[in-house]
């Protein structure tokens, strides 16, 4: 399939810097957690009998925290700082400047949350545009326009748009639908 000329390109270096900072912080957390885990395990291995269960627990907890943080880094690969869109394809760049390209026909749904909009595919690719993107509102509307053009379902906070109660999503609208009470005419 030939590459489409990109109709719209949105990028922001500050978003990329922010994503890279998150990865750096999480990597530092992994190093610290592994260090604490190895230290606790080493001390427990020295047969300090009184504190051995506590040290083993600390070691397992620290290594579990490191694993959980590593999963967070993998999830950050889904967040994009640059997105290129055409009527047929979308390409996004993660914090490593690695491109991910999906055809609109591969997108199974678009999920909108209060802090991001994500393109979700059946084969696992998720391309998520974080809400800290300066043109987030405009880019989100363009993504939704293209999704509607291709009849891709739109979800709000994981629920189908048809199943979403607008008054729950935007409680400030309740006042617009309130029926004014009239004083008694008698």
Image: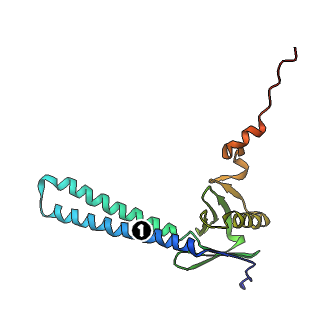
Residue in front for this viewpoint, 153 or 185 = 185
Residue displayed at 69% across by 47% down: 164
Q: Which residue lies furthest to the right in this view?
A: 185
Q: Looking at the picture, how far across and down is residue 51, in whole percent?
A: 16, 54
Snapshot quadrant of residue 83: bottom right
Image height of 159 relative to 152, above or below: above
Residue displayed at 26% across by 55% down: 57
On the picture, is 172 further left or further right than 97?
right
Residue in front for this viewpoint, 1 or 76 = 76
Residue displayed at 73% across by 80% down: 6
Write down the residue under mark 1: 25
Q: Quadrant of the C terminus?
A: top right
On the picture, is 50 further left or further right than 21?
left
Image height of 159 relative to 84, above or below: above
Snapshot quadrant of residue 29: bottom left
Task: Tally the marks.
Answer: 1
Q: Residue furthest top?
A: 186
On the picture, is 131 further left or further right than 185?
left
Residue in front for this viewpoint, 97 or 122 = 97
Describe the colour scheme in one phrase.
rainbow
Residue displayed at 30% across by 67% down: 34
Image height of 153 relative to 5, above or below: above
Q: Looking at the picture, how far across and down is residue 151, in whole percent?
A: 77, 63
Q: Looking at the picture, how far across and down is residue 171, in whole percent?
A: 68, 42
| 10 Å crowding of disc 1: few (<14), some (14-19), many (20+) | few
Q: Quadrant of the N terminus?
A: bottom right
Snapshot quadrant of residue 16: bottom right
Q: Looking at the picture, how far across and down is residue 13, in whole percent?
A: 58, 76
Mark 1 element type: helix
On the picture, is 26 further left or further right than 101?
left
């Amino acid at each position: 399939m030939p590459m489409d000329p990109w109709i719209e390109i949105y990028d922001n270096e500050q978003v990329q810097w922010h994503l890279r900072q998150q990865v750096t912080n999480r990597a530092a957390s992994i190093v610290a957690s592994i260090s604490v885990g190895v230290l606790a395990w080493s001390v427990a291995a020295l047969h300090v009998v009184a504190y051995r269960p506590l040290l083993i627990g600390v070691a397992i907890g620290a290594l579990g925290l490191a694993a959980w943080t590593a999963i967070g880094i993998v999830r950050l690969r889904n967040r994009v700082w640059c997105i290129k869109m055409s009527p047929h394809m979308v390409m996004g760049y993660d914090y490593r400047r690695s491109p991910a390209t999906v055809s609109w026909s591969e997108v199974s749904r678009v999920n909108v949350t209060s802090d991001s909009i994500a393109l979700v595919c059946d084969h696992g690719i998720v391309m998520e545009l974080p809400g800290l993107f300066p043109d987030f509102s405009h880019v989100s509307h363009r993504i939704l326009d293209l999704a509607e053009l291709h009849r891709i379902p739109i979800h709000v906070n994981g629920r189908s748009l048809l199943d979403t109660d607008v008054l729950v999503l935007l409680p400030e609208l309740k006042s617009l639908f309130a029926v004014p009470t009239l004083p008694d005419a008698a």
